[in-house]
Amino acid sequence: MRLSRRALLAATTAATALSAAPSASAAERRRHLRTGFENLAATAYAQLSGDRVGIVTNPTGVTRDVRHIVDVMHADDRVDLIAVFGPEHGFRGTAQAGGSEGRYDDPATGLPVYDTYLKSGQPLADIFTASGVDTVVFDIQDVGARFYTYIWTLYDCMDAARLAGKRFVVLDRPNPVTGRSAQGPVLHKEFASFVGRQPVSQAHGMTVAELARLFNGEFLTAPVPLETVGMTGWRRSDFYDASDLPWVPPSPNMPTPETALVYSGTCLFEGTNLSEGRGTTRPFELLGAEGIDGRWAAAANELGLPGVRFREAYFAPAFSKFQGRTIGGVQIHVHDRAAYDPVRTGIGLLVTAKKVWSGFGWRPDNWIDKLTGSTGVRTMIDAGAGTDDVVAGWQRELAAFRRMRKEYLLYT
């Protein structure tokens, strides 16, 4: 079964995945990096020729001169774009976390925009069928964390395209925090949700095209006819600033690539009664609560975590937890991003917050278990385990995921 499945995957997957020469300077890589969309457009959209096309995208689907690719494709007679599918926050990005734009006609192009948020399976397949498309294209900038919902929009759309008998094409973009390695706990299937459908590590270290190949080869009940259009000039060690691509916030609380760098660790504070910095200019870099003082930053610095230091900080979120109230906590300062481990850092901050602040608590719905993918992190921290012990608890499952992941990587 596995051999025939992978044979089918290989037969239905085309990829452009040329990397920059190892000796290329950073400036040369910036000049030569091209996204999947740029490589598709350079072929006059040959892979879409003769098809009625729909695209799953959001404000990050832009060219390097920040034109939206929907506007570009709609104006080009060489591609027959007939529909747009919007994820969480919407196609044009008008909705906050947990929201979408609904069904409407895009004022700029007149194209029908369909809402995919929280839709999956046959209901989503029915939307693809009703839209009249032959091929579904996906182009959204990811941030490298399992619980960032766009990769599960990708998964759900692939599954729905399979059910609807549609072809699926993924246009690749960089993982902004590199593709060096997978880190963190691996999801247990009983904790599957929209912040994690399948057993993927917390920081996956993959691009969306690589994830699509993984989903098709390992997790979908049957593969969808899949093609990927890869980048040229991207290497696994590259952070986002190795390219000259503009950064468009993928969601309202992901303002910079530096936010993405810490997100896969500090998003865990969504599962606590502390602020994760939403409502500030530094979401996921500022963490805190009422009653916390400089002891937390001191305890976190004593851990000696690589590549990062912590500063005592005070702030008043404009919305979300502790809205309008001044609270104390820490600001994360990454000084060596190559050495920095965001997931280990997130665990260290949880451990020390619980140690120094008597008010520490988990969200009553145990949201932390969905974010980490099991009860392991929460129960170990509650039992008094240290950072190293908690991290050691997921290493066997992480090693297995890394072995599986390796087969689907496209870049050196």
Image (cartoon, grey):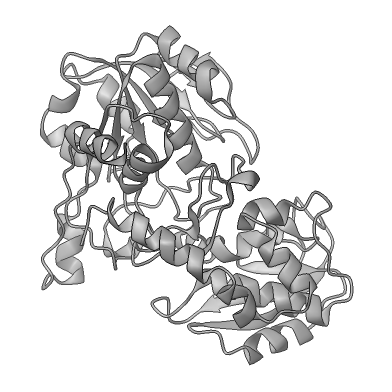
Of 386 and 93, the residue lying toward us = 386
Across and down, in percent, residue 345 comes to 58, 75
Across and down, in percent, residue 272 comes to 76, 60
Quadrant assignment, res 123: top right
Quadrant assignment, res 175: bottom left
Residue farthest to the front?
1
Q: From where the camera sits, is residue 261 visible?
A: no
Across and down, in percent, residue 279 comes to 69, 54
20 left or right of 259? left
Of 314 and 91, the residue lying toward us = 91
Quarter of the picture holding the C terminus? bottom left
Q: Which residue is drawn at 56% across and 50% down?
A: 147
Judge whether 95 appears above or below 236 on screen.
Answer: above
397 left or right of 326? left
Judge whether 272 appears above or below 295 on screen.
Answer: above
318 left or right of 333? right
Q: Residue at x 52, y 35 (%)?
A: 93
Q: From where the camera sits, is residue 172 visible?
A: yes
Across and down, in percent, residue 220 comes to 42, 34
238 left or right of 12? right
